[in-house]
Image (tube, rainbow, N blue to C red):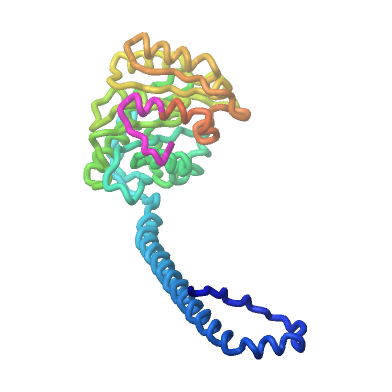
Amino acid sequence: METTTACPARNNGVNNQSTRMPAIQNRLSKNIFIESKCQKATYRYLNAAFSATIASTMRKNHLLLVLALVIPSLSLAAIVEEVLDVPVSVKTMYGQQVNQAIKVTVFRDDQREKAPYLVLNHGRPATVAGFAGMKRQRYSDNSRYFVALGFVVLVPTRVGYGETGGPDVEDSGRCESRNFPPAYAVAADQTAAVLDFAADLAYVDRSRGVVVGQSFGGMTSITLSTRQLPGLIAAVNFAGGGGGNPASRPANPCSYHRLAALFEDYGRASRIPTLWFYSENDRYWGAELPKEWFQAFSKAGGKGKFVELPPYKDDGHGIFSGNRDAWKSEFETFLRDTGFTIPASAR
């Protein structure tokens, strides 16, 4: 019968060596045999452990190699900002013909081969001094948010403003007798020119798109809802209107009754769903005029939804840029309702 002898535990100490010496001598040959067996077992164990370590390392290295190949392609995904010069031709209310290029800032995801468009129109300063200070219009935070929602964003700096410069082609005349339709028509014409130019941009899907605007640009969105533009599905108006001055005429814009009549005309001609956002403490228009404008639009046949937003600081007119959380839920719901798909990564 074979007897199994356990390998002795390693003892790093030296205890009672003198009394143990005879026993060690008597068992020397047996211990040599046992030690030989234990060494072989240890070698087998170490070999197996080493092989397992090598295999594990190879698996880890393989994973690292895969990640090394995959992560760069992920990290290369980025929002690209570029500036285009787009030729436009417009006529002022005085009959002046203006032909020049405007600056258009484009924001896009460079990993999307093609995406629907979102044209974002800026507002109009309340004072002459504000025009040059506008520089190139970008709305960079919201533009990047719109890219995350799946759009190519086009932000025109229209004629007369900022880096584009040129004459004030959107002037609507004296305060008491504003002639608004030609001014908004000029802004709409420039948006149409941007979309025509986008036909040559491989990354723009012109079969689907939305127009968004702030202040004068918001009214321009409603103007554009009356036109047959390529792929235009919806229009969004943030604080749209004209003739306002929060310092000299708070909540009492120039010729506001004429704006009501214009919104009514737009309601008769509008072809697409619209979404209207106004803060209750907007010092350009006040809380009530925007509701009257929307009623004029909808009673004339325009399709839209009015959303009253909470106050924002001292003047809710800037809530588009200042508090996205106040409007993003309604905005995204509107996009879904009008047929746009929001990427899962943006939710």
Res 70 → quadrant: bottom left
Q: Residue at x 27, y 44 (%)?
A: 114
Q: Nearer the viewer, residue 314 or 113?
A: 113
Q: Nearer the viewer, residue 136 or 172?
A: 136
Is the residue 195 above or below the residue 263 in the image?
below
Q: Can residue 132 be seen here?
A: yes
- Image location (x, y in percent) of residue 106: 36, 46
- Image location (x, y in percent) of residue 260: 42, 14
Is the residue 178 above or below the residue 313 in the image?
above
Q: Can residue 183 be seen here?
A: no
Direction from residue 91 to residue 248 in the image, left or right = right
- Is 335 magenta? The answer is yes
Q: Nearer the viewer, residue 340 or 292?
A: 340
Q: Residue at x 30, y 22 (%)?
A: 272
Res 167 → quadrant: top left
Position of the C terminus by quadrant = top left
Q: Residue at the far top: name it.
A: 299
Q: Residue at the far front: name it.
A: 1
Q: Residue at x 36, y 22 (%)?
A: 274
- Is 97 magenta? The answer is no
How many marks the image carries: the answer is 0
- Image location (x, y in percent) of residue 209: 30, 33
- Which residues are the magenta region? 333-347
- Image location (x, y in percent) of residue 38: 53, 79
Q: Residue at x 28, y 17 (%)?
A: 269
Q: Nearer the viewer, residue 323 or 252?
A: 323
Direction from residue 12 to residue 248 in the image, left or right = left
